[in-house]
Image (tube, rainbow, N blue to C red):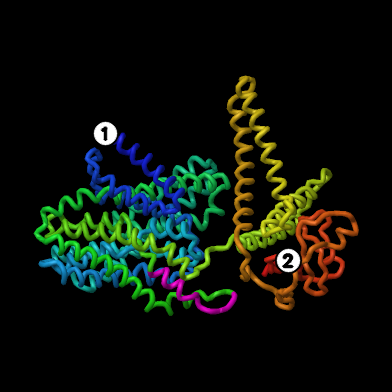
Amino acid sequence: MDIALFLVALAVGVLAGVVVAGRIGVPAPLLLVVVGVAVSFLPFVPQVHLEPDVVLLGLLPPLLYSAAIRSSLVDFNANRRAILLLSVGLVVFTALGVGVLAHELVPGLSWPIAFALGAVVAPPDAVAATSMGRHLGLPRRVVTILEGESLFNDATALVSLQTALGAALVGVELWRVGLDFVVAAGGGVLLGLIAFLLVGVLRRHLRDPVLDVGMSFVIPFAAFLAAEEVHASGVVAVVTAGLLLGHQAPVLQTAQSRIAERINWRTIAFLLENTVFALIGLQAQWLFEDLGESTLSPARIAGVSVATLVAVIVLRLVWVLLARSLLVRPRLDATTGAAPPWSFTFLLGWAGMRGVVTLAAAFLIPPDTRHREVLLVVAFTVVAGTLLVQGLSLPWLTRRLHVPAPDPLDDALARATLLQQASKAAVEELERQEHDDRSGVCDLIRQRLDQRNFAAWERLGTTADQESPAALYYRIRMAMISAERRRILEIRRSGTVASEVIAEVLSMLDVEESMLDNAAQERKEAQDYARRRWTIGETCDDLGRYPAVVAEPASYCQACLDEGTRWVALRRCLECGNVACCDSSPRQHATAHFREAGHAVMQSAEPGEDWRWCYVHHLTA
């Protein structure tokens, strides 16, 4: 009962901490660590000793898997050089640098144990990088590199730690270190690939979302344990399986399975990620209490801890700044052809927060190791210090360096273009098929495709004082859904309809309402951001022939005035300058102008918008 009550209290405290952090505008990981440290010194709170097996076998596999299935294999491959430089090269560089420092500062510390400490504090945390990067709205490329690095650097650190500890016991040859790493990494990739292939075969025969999601809960643990059993890297196996399964999910899984898996793993990751930070803080009391057994002075212990914290921060900055030419070479800016700015590189160097793997790895140091209690406090200082120092300063640095967050308007433009391309393919498929369509089904399908595309374009902006058709639809339909739900609940109270039928109908309304809420949130985000100039997607000869023009925003559609109709948003033909209404408007005069005159490219004539659209190739710039 004591354990159960503590776990319930921990879960409630974590949820409350996340809510409070959101209210005061502080990243939840930072607040949970601070609260955990404070709570650990309360007399009625039991000591919590975080065992290595609990972290490495219980927490790490699901955390890595949930991050991997949400990561983009395409983005990972595009940034693979930067990710490998950080997840392998930087970890080894940090381990060596901290090892030399620890050997000099801690009396009697052997070289193998010094390097073991370096391996312990070397890897930034996957959870910290993901949660902090998304909370702050860092550029997507920076977040992608941080996520990719944090997914694989644990493997490098754990292999380095095992090698150092082995050297402390029996000694080890240098060539053996390289061989161990190659075997661990290669074996992990192979086991992850095997797990992907096996699950892929099973998923092709599983149509039940419950069974599919249930199987996904087993995958990270099975892949991790299988790899560790053959002395390969369980971390690499889990990440490899997760990346491949996430990439192939649209092919291997049904739509219901994908939605269910996404929601379930999002919930699991949320609980585990935030619980991990609370557990880190709860280690403080007993770690500092054990320092009473140390023969080193408090000043020496404090000096070693602070020096190690500074070293891991400085070494990362040095490595990233020196390797900048390698980091940015694979990916240049699509618009300017130039390398990403130095501010991106500095943020990569500064965002090196450590997490629970560092603490768990520190506990693997043998109990009879000299000055072990000091080494544990050093590891805790590095974790708490990087989370607080770097985590608290990242928002300020991001603002000072003027690093742009992902722009919802850019996303809305890309989304509208993508949907237009998808609809074009759908219509071509519709025209290839032969139908005995006496009920006008094909026309209804085309109409629904048009309505979906119009709603996507409306998120880019409409007339300031006019409610867009999509916003009006949202407001009316939400009121109707509320009325429908009230009536269904009245019928449920009467008991005249089976509860299963009631639940099914309510679920249908929930699905529609959630889709409407998502679209409304995207519209709100887009309206809150100022428009910036970017090139989205591909280009074509027509877009190249008609670049964007600087002109005063248009104020009316003459054709609409002549017909006595209203317009939603205005578009300008870049060949003749004709101003006409958009496709969300009742009369769609801009499209009519293209069909009559054959002028292919138009530009938005709304204030603050400069995107262009090619009617021929269905591309945006």
Q: Which of the two residues, 330 or 394, is positioned nearer the viewer here?
A: 394
Q: Is residue 348 magenta?
A: yes
Q: Is residue 241 visible?
A: no
Q: Viewer-nearest of labels 1 and 2?
A: 2
Tag 1–tag 2 contact (CB < 8 Å): no
Residue pictured at 28% horizontal, 61% vertical: 382
Residue pictured at 63% horizontal, 63% vertical: 414
- Side of 533 relative to 31 (left or right): right
Q: Which of the two residues, 165 or 130, is positioned nearer the viewer here?
A: 130
Q: Is residue 132 visible?
A: yes
Q: Which residues are magenta?
A: 335-349
- Vertical comparison of 153 with 283: above or below: below
Q: Which secondary structure lies at badge 1? A: helix
Q: Which of the two residues, 432 or 613, is positioned nearer the viewer here?
A: 613
Percent from the top left, x then y, of residue 406?
A: 54, 63
Q: Quadrant of the C terminus?
A: bottom right
Percent from the top left, x then y, of residue 540?
A: 70, 74
- Tell me the tag on residue 286: none
Distance in Å between CA atoms under marks 1 and 2: 64 Å
Q: Which residue is mark 1?
A: 2
Q: Which of the two residues, 522 or 96, is positioned nearer the viewer here?
A: 522
Q: Quadrant of the N terminus?
A: top left
Q: Is residue 280 magenta?
A: no
Q: Of the residues shown, which amino acid type is indicated by label 1?
A: Asp
Residue pictured at 25% horizontal, 40% vertical: 45
Q: Of the residues shown, which amino acid type is indicated by label 2?
A: Ser
Percent from the top left, x then y, of residue 281?
A: 29, 50
Residue pictured at 86% horizontal, 70% vertical: 597
Crowd class of label 2 (few under 14; some 14 to 19; many from 20; radius 10 Å): many
Of the numbered discs 1 and 2, the one sitting upstream in the chain is: 1
- Residue 187 is drawn in which quadrant? bottom left
- Tell me the tag on residue 604: 2
